[in-house]
Amino acid sequence: MNVSTQQRTRKSTTRTRSLVALLIAGHPEEADRYAVKLRMDGYAVVPATGLEQALERAEAAQPDLIFVCVGPWAVPALVLLVLRSDQATRGVPTVLVSDHTRGQLAAEVGGLLSTENVVPRNAAVHAAREEQALSGRPAGCGRRPGWEQWLSPKRG
């Protein structure tokens, strides 16, 4: 077997790990909707219905992204603090859909990390963004990207 045959064999057996998103959602309808979006963006989705289950699954899945749709079952600030404190989720980029604003959460947790993004669930905010986008103006979260931009897998 010559060197080129060995290299070709080695390349064909090397597999890249697919990107994994840990999806924490309280409502099945929301979980399904966000799971579809995450899969379309190239992520394998690991669903969890609560924070305790999410931490267990994060340890096994080693997610590249954590997507949290905070429902009435959780306090958003507590969710962020727990995710920061667990070894399996610390430092993983996190998108948090919440009724709280970015400023409110930042005040409650002592500032947001660069890997944490808060997206408001408020319908009025989304309507205003849609109107801005239709008029040709930027429609993101101020200086921060919208959650859709966080989902784009970095392939390299």
Image (cartoon, helix red, strand yellow):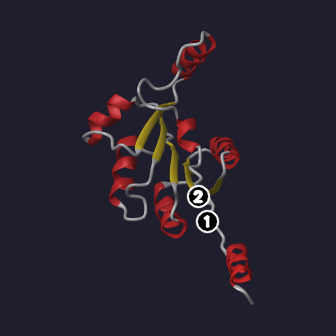
Q: Secondary structure at mark 1?
A: loop
Residue at 43% in and 23% down: 142
Q: Quadrant of residue 110?
A: top left
Nearer to us in this view, 52 or 67: 67
Instruction: Name the amino acid, label 2.
Output: Val
- The 10 Å Cα crowd at callout 1, few under 14, some 14 to 19, many 20 or more, is few
Tell me: residue 120, above or below residue 79.
above
Q: Locate the C terminus and report the quarter of the image it occupies.
A: bottom right
Q: Where's residue 105, x and y in %? A: 34, 35
Whole-number angstrom distance, CA of label 2 to CA of label 1: 9 Å
- Mark 2 vs 1: CB contact within 8 A: yes
Tell me: residue 122, above or below residue 64.
above
Q: Quadrant of residue 18?
A: bottom right
Residue at 33% in and 58% down: 85
Residue at 56% in and 22% down: 126
Q: Where's residue 128, x and y in %? A: 54, 15
The reply, left or right, for residue 28 in relation to residue 90 is right
Which residue in the protein does label 1 denote?
A: 17
Which residue in the protein does label 2 denote?
A: 20
Q: Where's residue 24, x and y in %? A: 54, 51
Of marks 2 and 1, the one in the foreground? 1
In the current view of this chain or complex, which residue is farthest to the left? 110
Instruction: Name the amino acid, label 1.
Output: Arg
Nearer to us in this view, 13 or 7: 7
